[in-house]
C-alpha cells in the first residue's frame, strides 16, 4: 500500500465537510478540519507531531468571516498540525500553561476577550496581527544580532579577507523596547541616556523627522523640567538656617549660574554683565575700591543696573517696635545695604566715562536702577509687614525685593508655562 500523509474528506453532509488527517507511516488518523457550507466558518483541530493533542486543553480553533483566507499567526497546512505558528509559540505556551481554554475563536474584526467561565479565548485578526508583529520584531532582532556577532567575529579573525560589517538598524526595535518601559528615568543606563540624546540631536538637526509642533512641545517639557530643577535648588537654599558670608556666597553662585532669574527681578530683558564688578571709589592709595554684587545690563538699551544681595535669613526689621505696637525700624543690614548700593551707583556715575574707556565696555548709565535682594517677608508678623511696606514704598531710588517674593515669581512662571 502506498504511503500517504495529508487530509481526506471523511464525511460530507448538506451543511459541512469533515476532514481527517492520515499518516500511514506513523499510523495516524484523526479529525483535522470542518468546513461549513452555509456559513463562513472553518474549524481546525490542532494535532501533535506524532498525533494526538497538540495542546494541553485547547481542542479546536474556530475561524469566522475569513472566506477561506485565514489570518497571520495561524498554521494553514495540515501537515504542520494546525494551531499557532512557530513565531507565536511563546504565546501559545503561555496560554497552554496558565489557562484551561478548550476553544480559540478568531473572528474578522471581532472581539478580543478571555472568557474564563466558558473556557474560550476570543481573538480578532487585528489582535493576532499585533501578537505576530511583536514576536516578528523579536525574531528579526535576534537573527540580526546573531548575524552581527558572526560578521564581527569573522572580520576579527580574517580582517584582510572579510569586509568590515556595516551597522544596520532593525525596524520597530525601539518601539518594542519602550513598550516594556515603566516610565521611570532611573530604568535607563548612562549609555541609554547618551544614545537617546544623540538620536534626538540627529533627528532635530539633520532631518525633518520632528515637526515644529513636536519640537515646540519638547521645548516646553524641557523648559518646565529645567525650571522645576531651579526651583528645587532655590527651595533647598531657602531651607538653610545659618546666616553669614558663606550663605551669601552660595546665593551669589546660584544667581550667577542661573542668571536668567534677573529678568524676573528687573521685569525687563536683561543680562548679567558682571558679578562683583568694580564700580570706582579708589583713593590716591589705590584703596577703598567699591565692588557691586551684580552689574546688570539691559540687553536693548545697554543701561546698567545695580543689584546688591544679602541672604534670605537677613533680618529686615528690628524685633522690638520703635513706637507703639506697629512702628518698626529697618535693621542696620537693610539700611546699610541700601546705602551701599546707592554709594556704588554714585561712584560708578562719577567715574563712568573713565571706566568705560578703560574697559572698552558697551554699557550706559541713565539714572541706573538700584535693587536690593534681602530677607524674607514670611519672617515678619502683621505689624512688621505694615512697617516694611511703608518703608519699601517710600524707597524711591532703591527697589527692595525679598527672597521669598523672588521664589514666588519663579514658581508663577512655571505655573504659566504648564498652562
Image (cartoon, grey):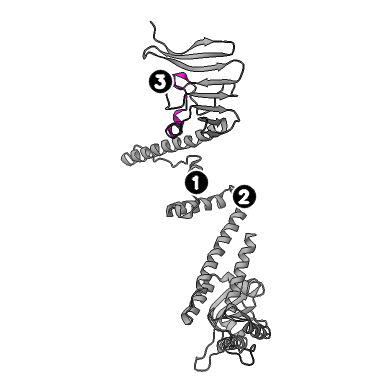
Numbered disc total: 3
Viewer-side residue, 260 vs 109: 109
Element at badge 1?
helix
Residue under label 2, please give it. Answer: 211
Report how far apart the C-alphas of labels 2 and 1 lie in the structure: 21 Å
Q: Main secondary structure of the magenta part?
A: helix
In the rendered structure, the answer to whether residue 68 lies left or right of residue 147 reads right
Viewer-side residue, 234 vs 121: 121
Residue 110 occupies quadrant: top right
Q: Is residue 313 above or below residue 132?
A: below
In the rendered structure, the answer to whether residue 159 lies left or right of residue 261 reads left
Among numbered discs 3 and 1, the one appearing first in the sequence: 3
Q: Which residues are magenta?
A: 77-102
The reply to whether callout 2 and callout 1 are in contact (CB within 8 Å) is no
Element at badge 3?
loop
Please state the horizontal and vertical placement of residue 256, each as a whole percent of the image.
53, 73
Q: Nearer the viewer, mark 2 or mark 1?
A: 1
Q: Is residue 28 above or below residue 355?
A: above
Please state the horizontal and vertical placement of residue 78, each as a whole percent of the image.
46, 19
Report how far apart the C-alphas of labels 3 and 1 lie in the structure: 40 Å
Residue under label 3, please give it. Answer: 52
Residue under label 1, please give it. Answer: 178
Q: Nearer the viewer, mark 2 or mark 3?
A: 3
Residue count near mark 2 (Cα–Cα under 10 Å), binned few <14, some 14–19, many ≥20? few
Amino acid at each position: 500500500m502506498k504511503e500517504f500523509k495529508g487530509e481526506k474528506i471523511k464525511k460530507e453532509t448538506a451543511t459541512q465537510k469533515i476532514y481527517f488527517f492520515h499518516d500511514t507511516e506513523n499510523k495516524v488518523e484523526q479529525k483535522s478540519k470542518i468546513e461549513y457550507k452555509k456559513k463562513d466558518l472553518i474549524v481546525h483541530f490542532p494535532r501533535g507531531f506524532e498525533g494526538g493533542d497538540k495542546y494541553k486543553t485547547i481542542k479546536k480553533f474556530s475561524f469566522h468571516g475569513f472566506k477561506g483566507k485565514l489570518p497571520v499567526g495561524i498554521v494553514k497546512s495540515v501537515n504542520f498540525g494546525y494551531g499557532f505558528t512557530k513565531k507565536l509559540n511563546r504565546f501559545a505556551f503561555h496560554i497552554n500553561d496558565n489557562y484551561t481554554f478548550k476553544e480559540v475563536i478568531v473572528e474578522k474584526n471581532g472581539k478580543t476577550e478571555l472568557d474564563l467561565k466558558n473556557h474560550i479565548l476570543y481573538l480578532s485578526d487585528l489582535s493576532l496581527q499585533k501578537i505576530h508583529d511583536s514576536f516578528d520584531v523579536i525574531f528579526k532582532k535576534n537573527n540580526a544580532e546573531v548575524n552581527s556577532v558572526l560578521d564581527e567575529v569573522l572580520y576579527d579573525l580574517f580582517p584582510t579577507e572579510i569586509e568590515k560589517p556595516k551597522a544596520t538598524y532593525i525596524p520597530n526595535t525601539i518601539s518594542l523596547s519602550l513598550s516594556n518601559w515603566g516610565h521611570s528615568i532611573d530604568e535607563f543606563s548612562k549609555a541609554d541616556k547618551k544614545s537617546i540624546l544623540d538620536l534626538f540631536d540627529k533627528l532635530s538637526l539633520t532631518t525633518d523627522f520632528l515637526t515644529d509642533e513636536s519640537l515646540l512641545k519638547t521645548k516646553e517639557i524641557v523648559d518646565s523640567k529645567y525650571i522645576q530643577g531651579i526651583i528645587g535648588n532655590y527651595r533647598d537654599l531657602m531651607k538653610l538656617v545659618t546666616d553669614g558670608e558663606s550663605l551669601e556666597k552660595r546665593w551669589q553662585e546660584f544667581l550667577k549660574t542661573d542668571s536668567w532669574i534677573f529678568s524676573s527681578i528687573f521685569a525687563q530683558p536683561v543680562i548679567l554683565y558682571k558679578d562683583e564688578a568694580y564700580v570706582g571709589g579708589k583713593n590716591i592709595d589705590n584703596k577703598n575700591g567699591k565692588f557691586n554684587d551684580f552689574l546688570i545690563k539691559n540687553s536693548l538699551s545697554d543701561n546698567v543696573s545695580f543689584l546688591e544681595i544679602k541672604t534670605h535669613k537677613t533680618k529686615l526689621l528690628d524685633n522690638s517696635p520703635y513706637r507703639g505696637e506697629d512702628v518698626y525700624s529697618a535693621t542696620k543690614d537693610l539700611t546699610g545695604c541700601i546705602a551701599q548700593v546707592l554709594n556704588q551707583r554714585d561712584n560708578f556715575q562719577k567715574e563712568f566715562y573713565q571706566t568705560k574707556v578703560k574697559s572698552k565696555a558697551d554699557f550706559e548709565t541713565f539714572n541706573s536702577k538700584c535693587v536690593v535682594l534681602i530677607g524674607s517677608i514670611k519672617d515678619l508678623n502683621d505689624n512688621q509687614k505694615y512697617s516694611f511696606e511703608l518703608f519699601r514704598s517710600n524707597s524711591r531710588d532703591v527697589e527692595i525685593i525679598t527672597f521669598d517674593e523672588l521664589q514666588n515669581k519663579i514658581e508663577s512662571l512655571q505655573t504659566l508655562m504648564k498652562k
